[in-house]
Image: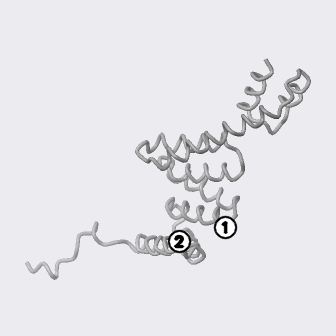
Amino acid sequence: MDSSITPPSPAKVPTAFAVRLKDADALWAAGRFDEARLAYEAIVADNPGSAAALCRLGDIRLRQGEIEAAHSDFLTASAVMPDSPWPHVGLGKIAEARGTLEEAITHFSRALGLRPDLSAIAARLEVAAQSQIEDITALLDEVDTSAQGVAIVGHEPTMSSTKRMAVAKRAR
């Protein structure tokens, strides 16, 4: 049989979806984020269950300051592919942007648990944890350690439980 007329195996023929995703990724890599965004939006419109396209769209939206839209993209991607680390990395980035470091650490930890071989996730987790330590240290330096000051700070509704515990220990 002449191999030049034999069709390639299905695994070697990229699907239209894969080609579109690769083209959108090339736009992203070239720094053409507005065009990449349009391409990812079109892919998601046709394939709402594409966690890869949702994560990449979320990354662009986050880069463009659209935190709530990016958050929605990453949540949807997480629901579609709960065993993928990338939606959790995106949710961790959202939490960092919002300044909720405990939440960021939770998401980065989840991502690292899913893919412990990815050093970039470990580095992201380390940076978030270090930022939280710095925030707590700064808070402790500023807190009034009198009983009344601790009582007031300890009931601050926006304070995380980790920070509350650190304040309480400092007051002892």
**Which residue reaches farthest front?**
141
70 to 170, vertically: above or below: below
3 to 125, vertically: above or below: below
Q: Quadrant of the N terminus?
A: bottom left
Residue 121 relative to residue 172: left or right: left
Residue under the image location 55 percent in, 50 percent down: 89
Residue under the image location 48 percent in, 40 percent down: 113
68 to 118, vertically: above or below: below
SS for tag 2?
A: helix
**Which residue reaches farthest left?**
1
- In this view, the mark in front (1 or 2): 1
Residue 127 occupies quadrant: top right
Residue 150 is situated, as x and y percent measured from the top left of the image, at 85, 26
Residue 20 is situated, as x and y percent measured from the top left of the image, at 45, 74
Residue under the image location 22 percent in, 73 percent down: 8
Residue 46 bears which disc, if any? 2
Identified by mark 2, the residue type is Asp
Residue of label 1: 64
SS for tag 1?
A: loop
Q: Quadrant of the C terminus?
A: top right
Residue 13 relative to residue 151: left or right: left
Residue 158 occupies quadrant: top right
Identified by mark 1, the residue type is Gln
**Which residue reaches farthest right?**
148
Residue 91 is situated, as x and y percent measured from the top left of the image, at 61, 51
Mark 1 or 2 closer to N-term? 2
Residue under the image location 72 percent in, 34 percent down: 137
Graded by Cα atoms within 10 Å as few (under 14), some (14 to 19) or many (20 or more), the crowding at tag 1 reads: few
Work out whether residue 114 or residue 3 is closer to the camera in this orientation and state it.
114
Residue 115 relative to residue 60: left or right: left
